[in-house]
Image: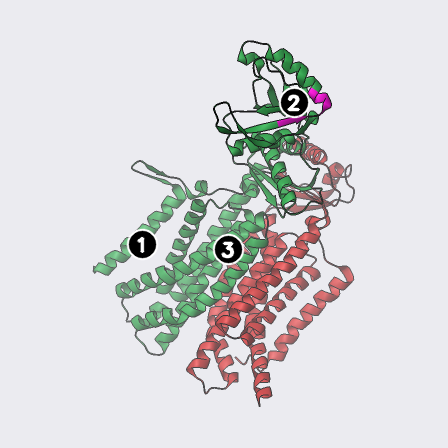
Amino acid sequence: MEVLKHRKVFAFISLIIIIAGIVVFAVKGLNYGIDFTGGSLIQINIGEFVSVDEIRTIIDEYDKNASILHAGIDKNEVIIKSTLDLSNDTIRTIINNFTEKYDLEEDNFQSEKFGPYMGKEIRDKAFLSTIIATVLMLIYISWRFEFSFGIAAVVALIHDVLIMFSFYSIFRISINSSFIAAILTVLGYSINDTIVIFDRIRENTRLYPRESIDSLINGSIKQSLTRTIYTSLTTFIAVLVLYILGVEDVKVLALPLMIGIISGTYSSLFIASPLWYELKNRKIRTAK
Amino acid sequence: MTKNTILFIAILALIIYGSVVAINGATIGNIQIPKARDSIDLGLDLAGGVYVVLEAKTDLKGPELQRLMEQSKAIINERINGLGVSEPNIAIESGNRIRVELAGISNPQEATELIGKTAQLQFMDQEGNIVITGKNVKGSEVQYHTNEIGQEEVVVSLELDKEGTQNFAEATRILSEKIEPEERVVFIVLDGLIISSPIVQYMEPITNGKAYITGKFDLEGANRLSTLIRAGALPVEMDELQTSVIGPTLGLNAFERSLEAGAIALMLIFLFMLIIYKIPGLIASIGLVIYTLIIVLTMSILGVKLTLPGIAGLVLSIGMAVDANVIIFERIKEEIRLGKSIRTSVDTGFKRALTSVLDSNITTLIAGIVLYYFGTGPIRGFGVTLIIGIIASMISAVIFSKYLLRLAVSVFGSKNPKLYGA
């Protein structure tokens, strides 16, 4: 597998996705969840499918613009999102309306309310924690390997974050507090992948000092390929099962993780090592 | 059967027994081992309950802010104690916020009302007449006094405003003339709950608006009382930043479904590993069971609360736990292909894979730690399970798998490389 030969093609594919994501972001912005914008959320398990129109007859009195979604395996659950800051009493009243109309158990619901200031904080935290995690990883990798490996790994990470961002932006996935968790997990996962390949390059450099960098890198990727694919597959299976069987709160975490796993695998194989190659080459050229 | 075969079967039996105990619970002699799912604390999103995040409207900073928040926390804590919630969790967050978590309560509405309500502090006499209220209290502090027999003791001082001084003087004059000590009690009542019931000294009315409550206080108890008296109402206005109410049924449903997802994911991974790696795959599957047991045990011992994102973190880490095994097995396969004996291949495979396993897991660990450090609430739960998961997977892969695989080689023989996935 000649990864190095096609490195520009691989980089180009990523670039297209990222640019598309940024264009959509520039035009439409992001789809912020209510924990970003502030607002209220009510989730009720009705036990049967109830049409949106029927639900509107209850909700319109409180917020005509509330968005209504169905959730759960049999679409038995209703999620009502309102950007209004409904009072606790109002929320209780709405829930009572449902429990009376559909003769439900009292405790089969969930409600959430967010002040409008949480959003900025989540955004700042996501940004800050991503940067801190990245810097710490860079330090660790530079210590265990060398600085050029660290740089290549970090660029691959930035790639993954940008791909996930694009995904959120293009597919209008609502950004909420699990966003931080998703991004950081993918960082942790992707770096894991990258390090395994770098470890192989490091080892092969020691074993075969006469070998050219090109064949060292290609060889190392080839040697790690089975492992990378198997691991990605098992992890992906685990998250996919979560996505299929999980409740709504788990789904919103599992979906970006699936994208992240794919992007992380891709970047470990096709972005990180070629980039290290470029860095190495440049160094050798300037040394000459 | 060789000694090793017996050992191998014994270990296998032990692990299966361990899993059965974890799933069903057991009674050995007098010791009750509860089911694993009962011994792990569930977070709010699974157990159902209420959480509220309040933000103090204040410009104070540093130690002053901290004192203010400690006061508010004490007051909220006092109010919640009246609800009878088991283990309420009240924490100060990012300086000026208080997160209140009440698990498993049936009427969340009552709780949210109570937390937000302005407390009423009253001083009452025996007949229930209100003598003074919280607004008459100018200050209350913890002080040290030397009593009649020369011992230093902790007291709570009380300073009243003008109106309070007058009313209190009048009331204590009447009270102090009563003979029986029980008749001279002043009840200090917060939200209908008696927090202290000092006795007015015989024939010593308090006329100057300054009183001391003595008693066998320790410093903490005195501090609490003075805080409550000083600030019967919250010392600062609190904004409701976030409120979340999860009905217990919905939470339980989420728990069941997540467990189911975890079990299915585990089965699929077992299947995958067995097909690809044969004997090492079997060892990896056993390793995964050990891994899961370690996690369950660690979580119940450390008292980590399992949350919904936490379960997601666990399932993800199960997927990743396989990774260490895959790295090692791929290495072993390579060694076998180089023509080495299976026994040596297993040893060198483990040795060579070690740096890779360590470095890759430590970098992932860094992400987990940052997540724990910066996250709040459920996200934090995700970080914790990820951290526990990574450490447990390294232990199970590097120590257990290695030992078991060596044992397996001696049991299943080392003639047929196909049995080892090569």
> According to the rendering, which colour does chain A have?
red
Q: Which residue is mark 2?
A: B122
Asked if marks 1 and 2 touch (Cβ < 8 Å), the reply is no
Residue drawn at point x = 37 percent, y = 68 percent: B350
Q: Earlier in the sequence, mark 1 or mark 3?
A: 1
Q: Amino acid at mark 1?
A: Leu
Pointer 3: what residue?
B386
Please identify the quarter of the rendering in which residue A282 is found: bottom right
Q: Is residue B139 above or below residue B344?
A: above
- The residue located at (50%, 52%) in the rendering is B385
* Parent chain of label 1: B
**Please, what is the three-letter code of the amino acid marked with disc 2?**
Gln
Q: Position of residue A85 (x, y in %)?
A: 74, 41
Element under label 2? Answer: strand
Mark 1 to mark 3: distance in Å? 27 Å
The residue drawn where x is 39% and y is 66% is: B277
Point out the image quarter for the N terminus of chain B: bottom left
State left or right for residue B255 relative to residue B133: left
Task: Kindly identify which numbered label has been placed on residue B12.
Answer: 1
Question: Which of the numbered marks, if any, corresponds to residue A277?
Answer: none
Same chain under badges 3 and 2? The reply is yes
Chain B appears what colour?
green
Q: Which residues are magenta?
A: B158-165
Q: Earlier in the sequence, mark 1 or mark 2?
A: 1
Looking at marks 3 and 2 on the same chain, the residue that comes earlier in the sequence is marked by 2
- In the rendered view, tell whether residue B184 sits above or below residue A119: above
